[in-house]
Amino acid sequence: KEFSRGGGESMAAILSQMDEDEAQQYLDQIQVEDIELYASIKQHYLTFNDLFSMPEYLMKDFWADPEIDPDVLAKSLRGFDEETINTIVSFLPKRKQAMFTPIDKPISKKDIRFARSQIVQMARAKVADGNMSMDEIFGQEELE
C-alpha cells in the first residue's frame, strides 16, 4: 500500500503502538516490498533490540540514565544471553549494578513486553527532547 501522508513517520507511529513482535512482522514485509518506505520508517521507529546496537558512547549514556529501574531492566532482559545482559549491566552506575538481579524464573511475555516498552519509551523521549538522535542510535551520525 502507498502511504501518501506522513510516509515513514506515520508508519513508525502506527508500529510504535503495536506489539513489538507484530510490528516486526509488518516491518519485515515492508522491507521486502518497499525498501525506500522501510528506510523512511527506520528513521523514526525504534525497537528494544535497536538499543543494543547503539554506538558504545551512546549506550553508556543511555543505560546509565537514573530513570531506568533495575527491576524493569531485569524483566526487559529476560531471555537474552548472559553476555548481552552483562554488557548492559556494565553501563549501569555501580549502585544500580548492585541492585540488578537477573530474572531466571519464568515470567509472562506480557510483563517482558511491558518492561521493554517502558525502556523504549525512555529512548524515544530522549530523541524527542533532542538528547540523542535516531542517526546517532543507528550509528549514522555525520562526521565532519
Image: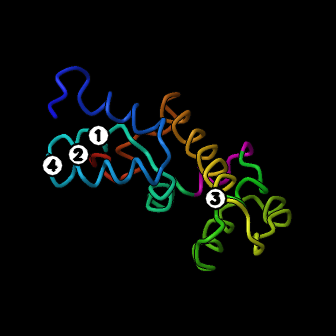
Residue that label 4 marks: 35
Q: Say which label, 3 or 2, has the lower sequence index.
A: 2
Query: Residue 40: percent from the left, percent from the top?
Result: 24, 39
Q: CB atoms at circles 2 and 1 under 8 Å apart?
A: yes
Q: Amino acid at mark 2?
A: Tyr
Q: Amino acid at mark 1?
A: Ile
Q: Say which label, 3 or 4, has the lower sequence index.
A: 4
Residue that label 3 marks: 109
The question of residue 65 being in magenta is answered with yes
Q: Nearer the viewer, residue 3 or 80?
A: 3
Query: Residue 113: percent from the left, percent from the top?
Result: 60, 52
Q: CB atoms at circles 3 and 4 under 8 Å apart?
A: no
Q: Say which label, 4 or 1, has the lower sequence index.
A: 4
Query: Residue 85: percent from the left, percent from the top?
Result: 64, 71
**In the image: residue 136, left or right of residue 61:** left
Residue that label 1 marks: 41
Q: Amino acid at mark 4?
A: Ile
Point out the stretch of residues depicted in magenta.
60-67
What secondary structure is marked by label 3?
A: helix
Determine whether 38 is above or below 56 in the image.
above
- What label does residue 30 carry, if any? none
Residue that label 2 marks: 38
The question of residue 97 being in magenta is answered with no
